[in-house]
Image (cartoon, helix red, strand yellow):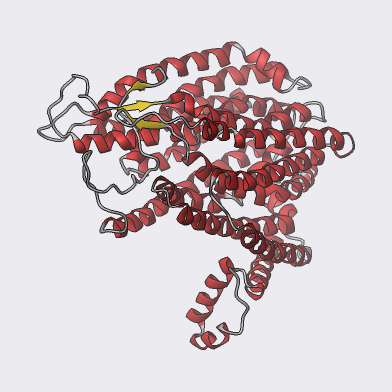
Amino acid sequence: MTTDQPAPAVAPAVVPPARSAGPSGAGPAAGGPAAPVRRGFLAKAFGVTALLSAAGSALGLLRDLLLARYFGANQGTDAFLVAWTVPETAAPLLIEDAMAFLMVPAFSLALVLREERPEGPDPVRQLVRATLPWLLLALCALSVAAGLGAPQLVALLAPGLADPGLAVSCTRITAFSVLPFGVAGYLGSALRAHHRFTAPASIYVAYNLGILAVLLAGQAAWGVRSAALGVAFGSVLMAGVLVAPFLRRLRPAQGRRQARAAAGPGGGLVLIPLAMLPVAAFTLTRQAQVFIERYLGSGLPPGTISHLNYAAKVSQLAMTAGILIVTVTFPLVARALAAGDLTAARDRVEKDLGQAAAVVLLGTAFLMACAPSVVALLFQRGAFGAHDTAATAAVIRVYSFGLPAQAMIGVMVRPFFSLRPVVRRADDPKSDDGGRRLLDWYPVAAMAFGLLVTVGVGLAATPDFGALGLAAGNAAGITATAALLLRGLLLRGIALRLSLVLTGQARLLVAGVAAAGAGALAAGLAGNPLLSTLIGGAVVVLVYAALGTALGAAELRGPVLALARALNPTATAAEGKLPHGR
């Protein structure tokens, strides 16, 4: 599809913004009867997404456990993890970020047009005909290019790899996943625009089940290549679970006239795919942190890349709940921004920053306190020995310094990009907003600066500290990016009350540091990994909740007092004696 060519599309969020009655159609006014439906919809969407995301994460963890058990951390797993860069880059670009920012709005407004013109040509089908064939062609080209260019890609990503031949073989296998990943992202965006969340939320369950099936069946015969074959098979399952639900959504309503004529004057929309370049660039620039780690890590002793990978996977589990909160509240922010209500958007973003930080800092404190016992409990068996446990646990503790910044970026980048003019109605006049479009590139610039910090710290620290230096560079770079994005939201027009936000974050940070210290002391009292994890984790939770409440952190105070009232009704009398936060 060419730029600025009419095509049916758009709305800036999964839940279309309320529209007042007007020439282009009717809809409920904001704050009217639709509001309770929206709250119920969001609650159900969060429940379904959280449950299936948790299942997908659990299966992904099981996948990593089996990789560690069968192959340990050596030159073979390093080779596979270089090949893993292909699906690891394709997933955020084709499934989670760039594709969703483009196609969810496009399908959302196509559905609005379907309701406005029930007797005309179906805008949803028009959109599919205009975009899907070109997408499939582009995905096939990318997949073939990645396969044919595997030797050059491996040499670029990891020039010091001990077994580049194995990495090339695995890369050629995983390159196939680009095609089904893109199809899954496209179909999932269409289904979410239709308010169908079960199938899109299940794709990582299907993906990891496919990897596990091939890994279990073929690890003895094919070695680490079985994991690469599992990636290819799992990606097919990922797209496959969405095909039937998508085709059901394409079926026209009974009695609808299926005309192939073009929409009448003013009836279509203009899709502007080039406006998605900043989103794609940000996604790739953020993913480049992994490229840098593997490039520098390839020159370190065999197994270093594997230690970094296992540490990153465990660390990311601490962010899952926080990112789910943001994913579900994003439509509220986008709706407020679409209505021009910057105050409501600001309030929601401030709440999201606090709630995400509260969840992520609790996970960070737990990892800081219990990393050795957690890694031993999860990975130390088979080919994964005590040395691997110690190395991975040390990297986790360094990585954890960057987790709060990762959560903040996840919160801030969504409202930043939701202000972008991705599509517009054909009858809307073009507006010259060159300044705003230039500002669209601010997150890319912020992430590029963060990458420079990552490279600088990594190069300076790696000779003396090895993998720990790479992890430190990652944490420093992502923290610098988060600080710049805070400033970027102000430039974008979302006037965060920085003193309020930073004071709340400081309360949570103090509670997290104290909880990590107390938890580490408690975890060291037990020699058994399971017992150490349970004792350390319990102490972390108790200290974090108690101190955060005492300091007046609103994100902790409310839930703690609600629990206290439920357990002891007389606790209400003590509520007024505690200091209040935001």
Hey, which residue is sitting farthest right in the picture?
Answer: 464
- What is the number of callouts on the image? 0
Asked if residue 500 is positioned above or below residue 196 in the image, the reply reads below
Residue at the spot 63% in from the left edge and 70% down from the top edge: 545
Q: Position of residue 196 (x, y in %)?
A: 32, 43
Q: Position of residue 421 (x, y in %)?
A: 44, 34
Rendering quarter of residue 192: top left
Hey, which residue is sitting farthest left in the picture?
Answer: 255
Drawn side of residue 377 relative to residue 490, left or right: right
Rendering quarter of residue 579: bottom right
Residue at the spot 27% in from the left edge and 53% down from the top edge: 29
Q: Position of residue 252 (x, y in %)?
A: 18, 32
Drawn side of residue 392 relative to residue 273, left or right: right
The quarter of the image holding the C terminus is: bottom right
Asked if residue 419 is positioned above or below residue 547 in the image, the reply reads above
Q: Determine if residue 554 is in view.
A: yes
Drawn side of residue 302 relative to residue 3, left or right: right
Drawn side of residue 509 relative to residue 269, left or right: right
Q: Position of residue 222 (x, y in %)?
A: 60, 23
Asked if residue 437 is positioned above or below residue 483 in the image, the reply reads above
The quarter of the image holding the N terminus is: top left
The one of 425 and 222 positioned closer to us in this rendering: 425
The one of 461 and 499 positioned closer to us in this rendering: 499
Q: Determine if residue 217 is in view.
A: no
